[in-house]
Image: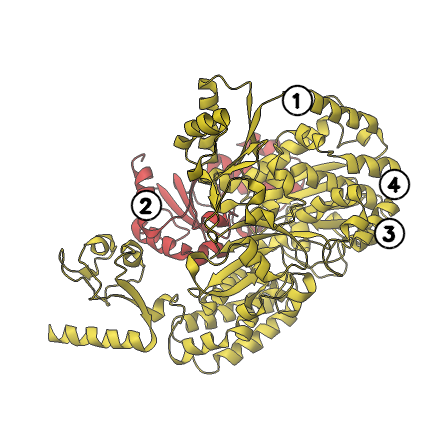
Chain colours: A yellow, B red
């Protein structure tokens, strides 16, 4: 790789890459992001390499290792091009067959093909699978064809073209105008207009300015930023260089969570490659513009995702937020004007420059433009990353793309926006997904986590979960957040334990409002949202916990019992053997009984009881009390 | 060790990076090294102590040979992650954040690893286990007890 000194050389390089490509007959693409690797993609790659070598096919078939393809539920998966055949949940022992049948004989293996649970139809073409077909994959599409550790793959797809256009044909004002006209809003949570943010920072007079890519994706259940950094790191880098040019910054930082080792690795490799060919450093592409990027690894603190805390962390201090104003655009990193955007926001920039603001602003709604990547997780059939145009209805995401709720259970709520967001109930599924509609419903877009909850999810437990999370992650600087979240957790915990009292709901409401109003940073200001939205839409569950001591979702451990139905139990000893505290008594072919006093409610018996038998039930409320009373009587007799 | 510290610039911005390096090499931050860091980076020991106790990545105590991390992100939570933690606590007779007396296992939790599709997720050192159930816990532990 030689240094590129003129923009024309970039186009020449692209041509060279394409014409020098080895004419492989087929390409096998292996999805190998973190979830792919955790599910065994590395073993699949090994098996592929072994098999191709054995059959001397290395020179005709290419193995391409890419980032995440988004359909995480079916990892490890591969796509075979040019046909686009999608094989799911592969095991190394499937590979010889894949090579023999599909690669050599062009035959499809039905057992490895995706089957649509709605129609029972087998669909072999990746693009025809409803999960993919109904998405609008703009930023994530290239994850299918880019090896993230090879800059050539990005260049071949017109990579850094937008940068060349900006550096040689546009002034910084024009770049900002274009971004403003596109209507792009920050993808990290608050949804501030990106062009406006850049403009503010550009106008500040200072010799030194910084830009930051916030990759401290801390919201549990959200991982689209990880996927972009792992799968297409150069798109983020290109966006950052363009932003730096527009704002007039000479140094940039990518702050990545330490929980994402593969993302750190790929972005670091990408930066080195970009530097080597003159896309970073002094005189980028031969222009007068200079820019450097550093990777900073986080250290495991959720609050560092807040912009002022993040800057403190880069400076080597505790990640404490501070009051705004002054905003980072005025006084940021080391007191210098600083512009912070989220990973996905940066990745949008090259598309806007390449295709133009007019094209971009046609996607989405009036106030929310473009696409957004969501991580659709929880109790949903098709778990994974989905990219959709803004304004799509929630029900389209859940049912058309997500394939509906797992195990045919009843949909209860969808939680958006992580710990700062809220739960949206079933009767609001017509809600369009955009910044303003979600805010109106009491939730937020956030970074894009969507957690589907079914009838087995207890909303009080979920509120307790999120509050415990924010309480633990509260940095402790301001009192409303430090003490307020702790009090909220204590009340919620009491309720889930069956120790709730009349008046608790009002206490929660008051306290939640105080914490929202009085906290210093975004963490505290949004922490009570899960409580407020669950109270707004699921008050009956709170009341049932407090008054009847019953958890209708059968999720709160202290309010339920496990019970073996005498008329169903076949006496197979399975639960008895698996009970960790030996609370189950019985003999082979005799009815087993749980000793309610010894039972720790771990659920192991329910898990192992064969589905055909299904003798273990959970009970709460009055039914629970009746069984316990009977149990007590039995004991007294003995 | 001094070698590691000497390689860093005399600037507070290097602190977290340096602490990561020490944590990686030793498995913890030995308390006696705080004064060395303080001299190198020209910042007070109390500031260093404040930073290293603020972030979850750093520990002042050595951790076990195998660090078991259970993901408790929202997706893992609704799929039963907390029950996995309970089971591990019971099996290892330690609480989250502790290390077994034989120094073989440490038990930790993490807020989200971003592998929500395959939860509940358990990671032992660098090996990921997906779709973990109560009954898989034993098999996972046995894999490592054999090594010990």
Q: Are marks 3 and 4 on the same chain?
A: yes
Q: Is residue A215 above or below residue A484?
A: above
Q: CA distance from mark 2 to mark 3?
A: 60 Å
Tell which tag, 2 or 3, sits nearer the viewer: 3
Q: CA distance from mark 3 to mark 4?
A: 17 Å
Please say if the residues under marks 4 and 1 sit with CB atoms less than 8 Å apart: no
Disc assigned to residue B101 = 2
Q: Nearer the viewer, residue A577 or A154?
A: A154
Please say if the residues under marks 2 and 4 sit with CB atoms less than 8 Å apart: no
Q: Is residue A530 above or below residue A630?
A: above
Q: CA distance from mark 2 to mark 4?
A: 65 Å
> Residue at image x 47%, y 73%?
A491
The residue that label 3 is drawn on is A203
Q: Quadrant of the C terminus of chain A?
A: bottom left
Q: Position of residue A163 (x, y in %)?
A: 79, 37
| Identity of the residue furthest to the bottom in this view | A502
Q: Position of residue A156 (x, y in %)?
A: 70, 30
| Identity of the residue furthest to the top in this view | A56
Please say if the residues under marks 3 and 4 sit with CB atoms less than 8 Å apart: no
């Amino acid at each position: 790789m030689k240094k590129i000194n003129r923009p024309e050389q970039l186009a020449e390089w692209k041509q060279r890459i394409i014409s020098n490509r080895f004419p492989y007959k087929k390409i096998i693409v292996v999805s190998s992001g973190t979830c792919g690797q955790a599910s065994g993609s590395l073993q699949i790659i090994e098996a592929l390499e072994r098999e191709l070598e054995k059959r001397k096919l290395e020179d005709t078939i290419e193995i391409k290792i890419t980032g995440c393809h988004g359909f995480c539920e079916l990892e490890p998966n591969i796509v075979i091009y040019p046909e686009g055949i999608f094989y799911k949940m592969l095991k190394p022992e499937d590979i010889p067959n894949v090579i023999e049948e599909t690669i050599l004989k062009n035959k499809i293996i039905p057992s490895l093909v995706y089957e649509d649970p709605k129609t029972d139809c087998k669909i072999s073409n990746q693009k025809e699978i409803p999960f993919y077909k109904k998405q609008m994959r703009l930023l994530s599409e290239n994850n299918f064809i880019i090896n993230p550790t090879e800059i050539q793959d990005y260049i071949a797809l017109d990579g850094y073209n937008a940068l060349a256009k900006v550096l040689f044909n546009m002034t910084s004002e024009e770049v900002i105008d274009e971004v403003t006209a596109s209507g792009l809003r920050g993808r990290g949570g608050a949804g501030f207009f990106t062009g406006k943010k850049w403009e503010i920072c550009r106008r500040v007079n200072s010799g030194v300015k910084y830009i930051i890519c916030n990759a401290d994706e801390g919201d549990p259940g959200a991982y689209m930023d990880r996927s972009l950094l792992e799968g297409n790191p150069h798109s983020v880098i290109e966006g950052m260089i363009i932003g730096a040019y527009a704002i007039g910054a000479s140094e940039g930082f990518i702050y990545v969570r330490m929980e994402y080792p593969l993302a750190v690795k790929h972005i670091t490799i990408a930066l080195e490659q970009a530097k080597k060919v003159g896309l970073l450093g002094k005189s980028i592409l031969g222009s007068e513009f200079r820019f450097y990027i550093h990777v900073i690894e986080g250290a495991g603190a959720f609050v560092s995702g807040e912009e002022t805390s993040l800057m403190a962390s880069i400076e080597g201090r505790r990640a404490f937020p501070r009051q705004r104003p002054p905003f980072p655009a005025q006084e940021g990193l080391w007191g210098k004007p600083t512009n912070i955007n989220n990973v996905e926001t940066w990745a949008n920039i090259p598309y806007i420059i390449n295709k133009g603001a007019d094209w971009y602003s046609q996607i989405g709604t009036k106030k929310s433009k473009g696409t957004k990547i969501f991580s659709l997780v929880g109790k949903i059939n098709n778990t994974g990353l989905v990219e959709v145009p803004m304004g799509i209805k929630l029900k389209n995401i859940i049912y058309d793309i997500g394939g509906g709720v797992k195990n045919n259970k009843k949909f209860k709520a969808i939680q958006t926006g992580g710990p700062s967001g809220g739960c949206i109930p079933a009767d609001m599924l017509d809600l369009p997904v955009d910044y303003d509609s979600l805010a109106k419903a009491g939730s937020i877009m956030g970074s894009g986590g969507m957690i589907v909850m079914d009838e087995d999810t207890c909303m009080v437990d979920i509120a307790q979960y999120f509050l415990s999370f924010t309480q633990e992650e509260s940095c402790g600087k301001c009192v409303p957040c430090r003490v307020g979240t702790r009090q909220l957790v204590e009340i919620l915990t009491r309720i889930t334990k069956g120790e709730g009292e009349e008046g608790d709901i009002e206490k929660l409401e008051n306290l939640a409002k105080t914490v929202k109003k009085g906290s210093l940073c975004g963490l505290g200001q949004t922490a009570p949202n899960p409580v407020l939205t669950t109270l707004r839409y699921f008050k009956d569950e709170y009341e049932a916990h407090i008054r009847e001591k019953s958890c209708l979702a059968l999720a709160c451990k202290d309010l339920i019992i496990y019970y073996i139905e005498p008329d169903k139990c076949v006496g197979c000893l399975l639960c008895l053997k698996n009970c960790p505290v030996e609370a189950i008594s019985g003999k082979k072919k005799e009815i087993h009984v749980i000793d309610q006093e010894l039972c720790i409610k771990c659920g192991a018996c329910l898990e192992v009881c064969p589905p055909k038998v299904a003798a273990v039930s959970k009970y709460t409320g009055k039914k629970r009390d009746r069984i316990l009373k009977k149990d007590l009587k039995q004991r007294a007799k003995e | 060790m001094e070698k590691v510290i000497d390689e860093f610039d005399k600037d507070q911005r290097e602190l977290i990076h340096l602490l990561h390096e020490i944590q990686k090499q030793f498995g913890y931050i030995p308390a006696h090294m705080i004064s060395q860091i303080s001299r190198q980076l020209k910042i007070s020991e109390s500031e260093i102590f404040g930073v290293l106790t603020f972030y979850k990545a750093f520990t002042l105590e050595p951790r076990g040979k195998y660090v078991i991390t259970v993901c408790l992100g929202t997706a893992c939570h609704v799929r039963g992650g907390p029950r996995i933690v309970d089971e591990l606590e019971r099996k290892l007779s330690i609480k989250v954040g502790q290390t077994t007396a034989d120094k073989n296992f440490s038990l930790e939790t993490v807020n989200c690893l971003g592998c929500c599709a395959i939860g509940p997720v358990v990671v032992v050192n660098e090996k990921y286990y997906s779709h973990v159930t109560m009954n898989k816990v034993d098999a996972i532990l046995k894999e490592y007890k054999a090594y010990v």
